[in-house]
Amino acid sequence: MRVSRIGAALVLTTAPLFLLPVRADAQLGLYTLPSTDFRWNWGSTGLEDRRGSPDIEMSGSESFFRCELEARFRPISMSPDQVRAIESDLRTRMDFIYAVSEVMYYLEQSRYIDWATLDCKKYDPGPTDPAVSAERQSEAREKMLREIERRRARQRDDE
């Protein structure tokens, strides 16, 4: 039995795809965060080993956590443009904690990090006053109606 050239090429090109590890958990967001404050470290974890000021100092939030990230890279590992690109990428992510952990893990494995710390504190928004909530809803409704009226007026002017 002979296999056609197209069939053989198809098998050869698609077979490696089945051998790659599947990362469905990261794609679907199936990760859980701790339930209380936490601190994660990469690279040198001792305070006496932390020399120099951080190359990245930023804050972010995700899922009732406010986090502070500080990281120092090895002197010849990354250019300032690369550091800015990492910082920019982390600022734009909605899943800040996951993104930081993923990037810092990669940089630690690549031995680019001298030290890094992600310090997260859980905040409680607390119960909201029903009167305040009703007022906010009313203001939002009024703003929406004004926007709809403005769009209708613009549409009438365009016609």
Image (cartoon, rainbow, N blue to C red):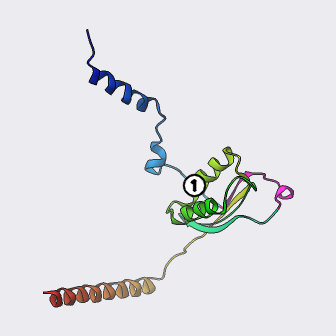
Q: Position of residue 86 (x, y in %)?
A: 59, 60
Residue that carries the numbered disc 1 in the rendered image: 33
**Which residue shows up at 49% across the image and 35% down it?**
21
On the picture, is 146 further left or further right than 70?
left
- Circle 1: residue type: Leu
**Which residue shows up at 52% across the image and 50% down it?**
31
Residue 49 within the magenta-colored segment of the rendering = yes
Residue farthest right in this picture: 48
Residue 123 within the magenta-colored segment of the rendering = no
- Please state which of residues 122 and 78 is positioned toward the viewer in this rendering: 78
Instruction: Give neighbour class at mark 1: few <14, some 14-19, many 20+ (Cα, 10 Å).
Output: few
What range of the chain is rendered magenta?
A: 37-51
Q: Position of residue 129 (x, y in %)?
A: 48, 82
On the picture, is 56 further left or further right than 45?
left
Q: Position of residue 7 (x, y in %)?
A: 28, 23
Q: Secondary structure at mark 1?
A: loop
**Which residue shows up at 34% across the image and 24% down it?**
11
Quadrant of image for the C terminus: bottom left
User: Is residue 41 placed above or below 153 in the rendered structure?
Assistant: above
Quadrant of image for the N terminus: top left
Residue farthest top in this picture: 1
Residue farthest left in this picture: 159
**Which residue shows up at 25% across the image and 85% down it?**
148
